[in-house]
Image: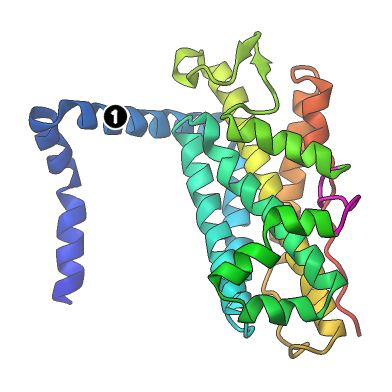
């Protein structure tokens, strides 16, 4: 009880701490203040002009946490850690978008590519999952490294992309803190701070980044479904242990992504729109 009160006290004095920092550490205070300003501005714009995006983020958060709850019921400690990382990186990605960080989608993109090739390995070589579980850190980094898995399955596509080369190209752009949709708002590059743009420009930039982050989360869930079905076929886990994901949440996100795609067709380069065309289909559970 006292512990909870102490936590609440710390939170209630957060504003006072920021005020105190203005005198002792003005640069840190300025950075935090600008980040808070960006969040407030972005949430205000989304709430008034694009509430559907907030609904989609909420739904995505729900089914990612459902996936996290499910994987904890499966004897797979490394997979549990992986899902926790994906969920955490999604939350950080959304927060990064609200703060107008161009690199906000970098971690979710990396997670998606690693997840896709790793789960493909599990599906094609059933025994590899047990090997992965038993592997120590050094062995894991070697046999199950991202580069080695791609070499082991040449020509395979990464879910959501036409081919591995395109997936690598997108990730490379992300890793350079550049979004695939470079000239998005009146010829301005996305690397330009959205706070310098009018409200309409901020909204366009934020919605594009949110769509990218949500797309990565959707493909991650698809990968988990494919892996789950494969494991059920092999009778490696109890078939009654299902992923607790409300299909309505999936529909909410898909509808918003489709609406966003249609709305942006006239304003965004065609090559950028291809990123939002991979449909999500929940795989049926084998009877």
Secondary structure character of the magenta stretch overall: loop
Display coloring: rainbow
**Residue at which label 1 appears:** 31
Along the horizontal axis of the image, is 116 left or right of 79?
Answer: right
Quarter of image, res 116 = bottom right
Along the horizontal axis of the image, is 15 left or right of 145?
Answer: left
Relative to 197, say whether 223 is above or below.
below
Q: Which residues are magenta?
A: 153-161
Quarter of image, res 282 = bottom right
Q: Position of residue 212 (x, y in %)?
A: 67, 39
Q: Position of residue 22 (x, y in %)?
A: 13, 29
Q: Quadrant of the C terminus?
A: bottom right
- Badge 1 marks a residue whose secondary structure is helix
Along the horizontal axis of the image, is 56 left or right of 8?
Answer: right
Q: Quadrant of the N terminus?
A: bottom left
159 within the magenta span: yes
Q: Could one spot residue 172 in this view of the protein? A: yes
Please tell me which residue is depicted at 86% across the width and 67% down the height of the picture: 283
Q: Position of residue 232 (x, y in %)?
A: 82, 83
In the depicted view, which residue is nearer to us: 223 or 18?
Answer: 223
Please tell me which residue is depicted at 88% across the width and 53% down the height of the picture: 154
């Amino acid at each position: 009880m006292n512990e909870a009160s102490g936590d609440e006290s710390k939170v209630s004095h957060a504003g006072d701490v920021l005020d105190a920092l203005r005198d002792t550490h003005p640069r840190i205070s300025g950075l935090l203040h600008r980040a808070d300003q960006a969040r407030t501005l972005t949430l205000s714009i989304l709430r008034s002009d694009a509430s559907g995006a907030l609904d989609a983020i909420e739904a995505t958060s729900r089914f990612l946490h459902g996936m996290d709850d499910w994987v904890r019921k499966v004897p797979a400690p490394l997979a549990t850690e992986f899902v926790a990382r994906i969920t955490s990186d999604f939350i950080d990605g959304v927060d990064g978008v609200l703060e107008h960080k161009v690199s906000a989608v970098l971690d979710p993109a990396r997670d998606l590519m690693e997840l896709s090739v790793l789960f493909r390995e599990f599906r094609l070589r059933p025994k590899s999952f047990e090997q992965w579980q038993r592997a120590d850190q050094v062995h894991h980094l070697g046999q199950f490294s991202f580069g080695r898995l791609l070499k082991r399955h040449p020509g395979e596509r990464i879910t959501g992309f036409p081919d591995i080369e395109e997936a690598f190209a997108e990730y490379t752009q992300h890793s350079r803190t550049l979004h695939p949709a470079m000239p998005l708002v009146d010829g301005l590059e996305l690397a330009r701070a959205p706070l310098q743009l009018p409200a309409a420009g901020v909204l366009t930039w934020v919605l594009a980044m949110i769509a990218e982050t949500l797309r990565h989360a959707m493909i991650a869930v698809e990968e988990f479904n494919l892996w789950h079905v494969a494991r059920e076929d092999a009778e490696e886990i109890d078939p009654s242990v299902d992923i607790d994901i409300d299909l309505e949440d999936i529909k909410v996100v898909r509808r918003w992504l489709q609406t966003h795609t249609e709305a942006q067709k006239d304003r965004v380069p065609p090559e950028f729109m291809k990123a939002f065309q991979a449909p999500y289909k929940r795989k049926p559970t084998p009877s």
